[in-house]
Amino acid sequence: MKILIDTNIILDALLAERAYRNGMDYIITRNIADFSKSPVQALTPTQFLKTRVC
């Protein structure tokens, strides 16, 4: 069997785990679907700015 794994998938999994282990509040990304199972909430840049604007 030959397979090709998109490196973005590996990076997304590793980044979500690092965010969790380092106690991050959010993951800011253009593709929140990639982080749907992450224990850290994923937000788009626009969503993040809307929640952080005073």
Image: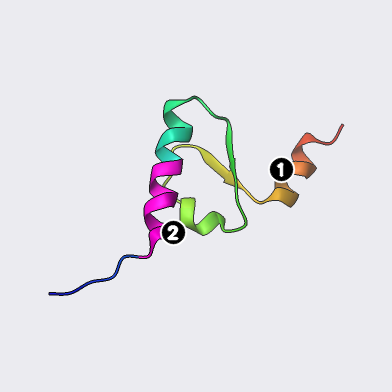
Which element is circle 2 on? Answer: helix
Tell whether 44 sits left or right of 35: right
Q: Amino acid at mark 1?
A: Phe
Q: Quadrant of residue 54?
A: top right
Q: Residue furthest bottom?
A: 1
> Horizontally, is 45 left or right of 50 in the view?
left
Q: Quadrant of residue 26?
A: top right
The quadrant of the picture occupied by the N terminus is bottom left
Instruction: Name the element at disc 1.
Output: helix
Is 34 placed above or below 4 here?
Answer: above
Q: Which residue is mark 2?
A: 8
Query: What is the crowding at mark 1: few (fewer than 14 residues within 10 Å), some, or many (at least 20)?
Result: some
The amino acid sitting under disc 2 is Asn
Task: Residue at 75%, 38% (x, y): give it.
Answer: 51
Residue 7 numbered mark, or none: none
What number of labels is visible?
2
Q: Which residue does the image show at 44% across and 59% down from the upper left? A: 8
Quick one: which residue is furthest to the top in this view?
23
User: Measuring 62% from the left and 57% from the top, which residue is drawn there?
Assistant: 30
Q: Which segment did they paint magenta?
A: 6-15
Is 7 magenta? The answer is yes
Residue 2 lies, with reference to residue 18, above or below; the image says: below
Label drawn at residue 48: 1
Q: Position of residue 42 (x, y in %)?
A: 56, 45
Q: Is residue 1 above or below residue 32?
A: below
Give yes or no for contact between labels 2 and 1 (Cβ–Cβ under 8 Å). Answer: no
Nearer the observer, disc 2 or disc 1? 2
